[in-house]
Structures are given as C-alpha cells and as structure tokens.
Image (cartoon, coloured by chain):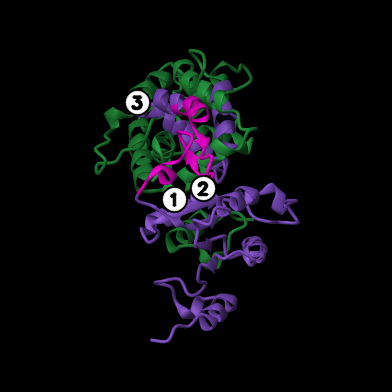
Chain colours: A green, B purple
Amino acid sequence: MYDGIVQELIDEFGRLPGIGPKSAQRIAFHILQTPSFDVKRLAELLTEVRERVRFCEICGNVAEQERCAICRDPRRDPAVICVVEDAKDVAAIERTREFRGLYHVLGGAISPIAGVGPDDLRIAQLMTRLADGTVQEVILATNPNLEGEATASYLSRLLTSMQITVSRLASGLPVGGDLEYADEVTLGRAFEGRRVL
Amino acid sequence: MYDGIVQELIDEFGRLPGIGPKSAQRIAFHILQTPSFDVKRLAELLTEVRERVRFCEICGNVAEQERCAICRDPRRDPAVICVVEDAKDVAAIERTREFRGLYHVLGGAISPIAGVGPDDLRIAQLMTRLADGTVQEVILATNPNLEGEATASYLSRLLTSMQITVSRLASGLPVGGDLEYADEVTLGRAFEGRRVL
C-alpha cells in the first residue's frame, strides 16, 4: 500500500506480539511524523539489548551480569524460593513488594499440546538449588490455568520427599472485582480457600 | 523493575502510540526471547526510514522520491483531487480501489482547540494545484467529525467561486452495521442522504 520502506517498517512492527496492521501503521507514521521521537535511540537499544541481556545463571531471570539483581541482593531471604513460569512474572510479583525471597524461572509450563515436557523447563536447575538444604519453602507461583496447575502439581509431587514446605498461591476473587461476574471455578476456589475471621 | 537496558527498551516501546506498559513489556520480552526475530532488521529500518522517507512535493503523501507513486502514475486521472487529512487516509481510500484520481494531504484538520488554523494546513498548495484549470472535481474526504467537517466547510467556501465541482464523502450507516446500534447523528445523515431506488 505504501512506498517501499514505509511498508517494510509497518510489516516489521506488525510481527510484534499484540500489534495488528492498524496499530503497526499508526506506529510507523508516528515515527515518521514526530520529530521529537528518538528513532536512533530505539534502533541502538534494539541492537544492544540482545548482546547485553543474558539470563541469570541461578534463577533464569533477565540480567545484564552472570547473576540477576535479585540473586545478587544480600538482603533477599535465600530460604524461600518462588517458582514462576516467566521472567515477566518476577516483575509482577516484585511490584507487590510482598515477597523478599529468591525466584526460580522455569521458562514455561508443562503443556502436552504445545509439546513442552518437564525436561524442557529449568526443573533440574531448581533441584540442584534445593540440594544443599538452605531452602525451607518453595512457593509455586505458576499461572492458575491448565498448564500452570499441571506444572505446580508435577513439582509438588517431585518435592514431596524433601524436607521443604511447598505452597501454592491462593486462588479466589480478584480484589476490587464483583462476585456476580466471577466465573464458577474462581468462585469455587474462593469458597474452598475461605478464611476464618 | 528490570535491570538497565531491558527497562529502557520497555520504556522506549511504551512511548509509541497505543502501546501501554503491559504491551511494551510483552514486546520487549518477545524481542529478547525469540531467536527468530530479526532485531537487526528492525533497527536498520528505523535508522533508514527517517533518512529515506520524504513527503511528496505535490500531494504531501509519503514518498521515497520527490513525487509519490500515485502522483507519478500516468494512469491516474488528474481531473479529480481527493482531499484528505492524513497520509494514512490515502492508504485507506486506495484499499477501496474505487478512486482513480489524485490526492491532496492537508496534514491535519482545522481545530481551534488544538490551535490548528487554515494556515497550518497545506491549503495554499491545494489552491496552487487548482489554478491551472486541469482539476474538474475536488472530493472533500476529511474525517466526519467536528474538525473534519469544519475543514470541509472552510474549503468548500474557498472553492465556491471557482469552476470546480466540490463534493463530500457520504455519511450514513456503515455497511454490515446494525440500524439499532447506529447513533442518532449517523442515522439522521443516512435519512438525509437517502437514495431513490
């Protein structure tokens, strides 16, 4: 539809997740027409990011050094490990400021449909971390969906023989949500997990 | 939330239109974690696009030469000019394959609130194009909103003394839409513009 490079830029943005053809066009024109937009900076960041970013050798979180900022932080409690599917989940939990332990990023969840088995996840690395007896509790914070639940129950069975407390994040009604609009599974979980006041 | 450059990349994507913090994070991680994503190509395109893309000296559409592909095309009818607000509108009209004339991109619409007056638009250039008498019809295809209507009526008054047919795109019910859900202004316009069958 457009002359050469403009269409190429639109196509390239359209390849990014969550960006449809209309958004890609809007972004390309924003870049073309906004003098203040620092094109050079974005181009440099894109080139640098793959070179500089690696994954923490301990927990698998994104890092710019061999170990991520959380694993390097001496104030974090090494007795608690929170197991998540993805590095994005680490950021989500960090935003709550509720958790002061360490993380372990699995790099996905068990999914027979997608062909992801336990060996494709960083489970062996987790077992190595648990071997020296420092860790007292493992919090399973995989997603509350089919794959996440399967992964959590797999890990839970794997850890059952060890002297470690294994816990799972609570399921229930989202805060600020409306009981009327909750699906029956969530509402059922909220009943199961009800707390005595 | 993230170590250095990852956060910088997220922030930079968050500056693009229509991309919130969550989408920016998703895109940054897609770029980090997808080996097949050609980071270098996107970086090169970003650097090149500003250098290579200019705006057509005749119509104001995006172009890689002095004149855009449409103005260069000898098969297009020079007797009809379609006036649009933005280069994105040219692409939208081209997709219909209904129009075989030329375009004129105003570069916006008259908006007293945003401080955009007639002198900020490419109206003088339009008048120059109309001066030699080649153009028989001007189709006003500005957006059917407050600013677009104001711009269309301004241009219509400006062109009234010339021997040129001035037309406006029809307003009415969108095809495939539902009468029940149409707003009253659109429905009113559909009545006004009803056609005898």
| CB-based contact (under 8 Å), mark 1 and mark 2 | yes
On whether residue B62 falls in the magenta region, the answer is yes
The residue identified by callout 2 is B87
Q: Is residue A84 above or below residue B93?
A: above
Sort mark 3 into few (<14), some (14-19) or many (20+) by Cα contacts within 10 Å. Answer: few
Determine whether the residue tagged by mark 1 lies in a helix, strand or loop. Answer: helix
Q: How many marks?
A: 3
Left or right for B115, reference B73: right
Sort mark 2 into few (<14), some (14-19) or many (20+) by Cα contacts within 10 Å. Answer: many
Residue farthest toward the front in the current orientation of the protein:
B132
Asked if badges 3 and 1 are on one and the same chain, I answer yes
Q: Position of residue A155 (x, y in %)?
A: 36, 34
**Tag 3 subunit:** B
Question: The N terminus of chain B lies in which quarter of the figure?
Answer: top right
The residue identified by callout 1 is B91
Asked if badges 2 and 3 are on one and the same chain, I answer yes
The residue identified by callout 3 is B35
**Tag 1 subunit:** B
The type of residue carrying mark 2 is Ala
Left or right for B131, reference A11: right
**Tag 2 subunit:** B
Residue at (33% x, 29% y) in the render: A121
Q: Nearer the viewer, residue B100 or B130?
A: B130
The residue range painted magenta reads B45-74
Determine whether the residue tagged by mark 2 lies in a helix, strand or loop. Answer: helix
